[in-house]
Image: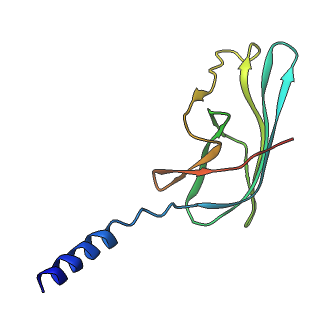
Amino acid sequence: MKNLFWFWGLISILSGCEPAKKLHPAEILSASYSMVTHSEFERGYEVQIELIPRTENLEVKEIIINRLRMSLSNLVQKDLDNWEIIGYLPVQSKLIQNFEPPRADSKNDGIIFEIEGKEYYQEIKFKLK
């Protein structure tokens, strides 16, 4: 009987320690990028991502490519169900006044969403064009 209680307690503890399920705020339909160089003064990434949001109040905040974290301001085009992110993200620039390069990040390629003030990271497998 004593062993039965010990066994039951062990099962209860183990079942309570489930790993947290990852939230995927969007379904990524396609994701690609290419390196772009504008003379010797500027280079960056041309990005194209198509996604379907899975939750309300979803905001696209930043993107991570090659361990660089970049802001996506003004690049998100929202349709009824599909969202598209198309644009140029500079990495180095001598043409943009007071240019600040993207921050380094240890995460794999992905996208950072914001839902009601909380950030959610979703890994993306980009295709190089």
Residue 68 vs 26, above or below: the answer is above
Left or right of 57 on screen, residue 70: right
Q: Is residue 2 left or right of residue 23?
A: left
- Image quadrant for the N terminus? bottom left
Side (left or right) of 56 relative to 10: right
The one nearer the camera, 3 or 114, is 3
Residue at image location 57% in from the left, 27% down from the top:
103
Residue 86 is situated, as x and y percent measured from the top left of the image, at 79, 44
Height in image: 55 above or below 12?
A: above
Q: Position of residue 69 (x, y in %)?
A: 61, 34
Examine the image and state in which quarter residue 70 appears. Answer: top right
Q: Residue furthest bottom?
A: 1
Residue placed most toward the observer, 104 or 42:
104
Quadrant of the drawing holding the C terminus: top right
Q: Residue at x 67, y 50 (%)?
A: 124
Q: In the image shown, does 5 or 90 lie closer to the viewer?
A: 5
Report the label total. 0
In this rendering, is residue 89 above or below 47?
Answer: above
Q: Residue furthest left?
A: 2
Residue 72: which quarter of the image?
top right
Q: Position of residue 93 (x, y in %)?
A: 74, 17
Residue at the (23%, 80%) spot, across then down: 8
Indicate the position of residue 56 as horizontal and vertical percent values: 57, 65
- Taking the spot 33% from the left edge, 73% from the top edge, the residue there is 15
